Image (cartoon, rainbow, N blue to C red):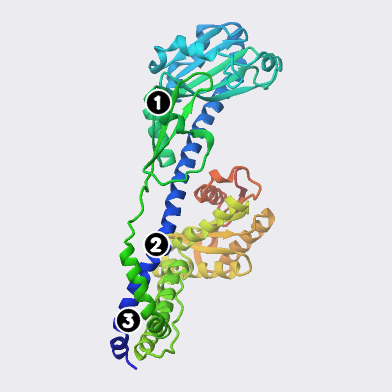
Amino acid sequence: MTLNRFSLLLLSSLLLTITMLLVSIYYFFYLPGIKTEVLDQQQQEYNLLYSALSLSKNSLTTLCYDYAVWDELVEYVGNPTDDFVQSNMPDNAFEAANIDAVFVIDTNNKLIWDYQDDSLKSSRSSLVHLFHQQNTEYFAVLPTAAEIASQTVSSRSGYLVFDGALIYFSNTTILPSTGHGEIAGSLTMVRLVDKALINDISQFSLVKFSIEDAQTSTSTSTSTNNMQEFFSLKKIETIAPSHNWLIRNTFNDQVVQVTLHHKKVSLPQLDWVSAISILLSIVLIVSLSLMALSRLLIKPLIRFNKSINDSSDDNFISKMASNHFIDELENVSYSFNQLLLKFNAQQNYLETLTVQDSLTGITNRRGLEAFTKRIIARWHLENVGFSVMMIDVDNFKYFNDKQGHLKGDDALTAVATSLLEVMAQYDGLAARYGGEEFCIILADNHHQNILKVAEEIRESIEKLHISNNIDDRDWLTVSIGVVVVDDKLADVEKYNFSDVLQHADEQLYLAKQAGRNTAKVTKFGD
């Protein structure tokens, strides 16, 4: 049976069936999934914003700790000097770190020194007064008498609403850099969550949000009282273009409103009349036509499509099944399989050309670079050591000038062949690096073993007996620079293959300086 005849018989039912199925799946399966997906995305955006605000606060706590646990600051609290402030606590350092206010307070809660950005200078006295409030069990910035008596480092941090804006604060006891001893006072750092910081957090978290003053009043008390606390981590239950939360002080009535603007905000509209019509049509026709279509046409096409799509994942295209009820499908599968055979043969040929040196037949520099990526990855991730040899044919320019470039090409080919013969006994790769230079990478990193291999290579080249009378030698020789990379080297992530190759080149230079026809070996990092 031909595909044309088959299509004429089932075309009308096929079109109607596919349409009905797609619409019913969309309305009755996909739409509920969309709602769940939108809710999940809005919840994820809230979680990301929560984490971003928390991380921003934590970075302030870390910076405050670094300054407070400091021997020089302990001495400064006991004996304040302008020289210390100018040398160690300049305004531009805090501006660069986005710190809007810094307060140094002794154990008697006396202000020793402070810095405030222009955005907070007008509120200096009220901000200092705010920090000295110790009258609630939920709010305390300065350390208590018990925390000071403990003679160990302690920190306090959190969020405050101040003059209609949100600020982070972090306070750490000032004591020696050992982390324990007599406490000299405490250091408080403040960061204002202004528009610039909101923009930075938005870019970091990939969510759009705003923070606005939400002071309680007669007109707004009902709406704000119904809002949840931002840090309550309550689950979002309804889809909306935006969601609002409150951040409030625990000791006064100052409140800010956090508004998160979502990316996905609505669902497609459902046409119930069309949906009911679709269901009635499906009941009448799908049971008869879809079974035949699926068995004879759709399933083979799906298998074709799956085979092609799977090739994008692993770059391997499998053959198609060749036995089909429809003649055209069988012809297509046969033609596809024949084309696949030709494609694979051409692909293998092209891949060989890209990594094979056209003169010597061994791996070229591109193939070497691909191999080194795997070696370096194992070195970085698994601490697997290796060795690198740079090999240079001695006095090759003299050889070319005296015997001609054709002889030079033959000599390079012979050297490459000899390298392959030696490397056949070991776990490694030999490649032509360029000109008369070759490079070898070995999985072994034992010094004596590598020195033995290098000597074996040097001797095998000399035994080729390629005539090159120079420097009291009868035969063509090579110089070898070797670097052994230890598998226990610290901080391997900061090194790459070029660093190793540079060491190998240095050893190659030493081998040439030593009179050529020799090998120099060193350990990477020495």
Picture coordinates of residue 4 (x, y %)?
A: 28, 88
Q: Quadrant of residue 105?
A: top right
Count neighbours of disc 3 (C-alpha within 10 A) and say few if under 14, some if 14 to 19, many if 20 or more.
Answer: some
**Disc on the earlier residue, 1 or 2:** 1
Q: Nearer the viewer, residue 496 or 298?
A: 298
Q: Quadrant of residue 446?
A: bottom right
Q: Which residue is mark 2?
A: 401
Residue 214 disc label: 1
Disc 2 marks a residue whose amino acid type is Asp
Report the label total: 3
**Disc on the earlier residue, 2 or 3:** 3
Q: Nearer the viewer, residue 244 or 79?
A: 244
Q: Which residue is mark 3?
A: 13
Quadrant occupied by the C terminus = top right
Q: Could you tell me if residue 192 is visible in this image?
A: no
Disc 1 marks a residue whose amino acid type is Ala
Disc 3 marks a residue whose amino acid type is Ser
For the point 52% across and 51% down, which residue is it?
497
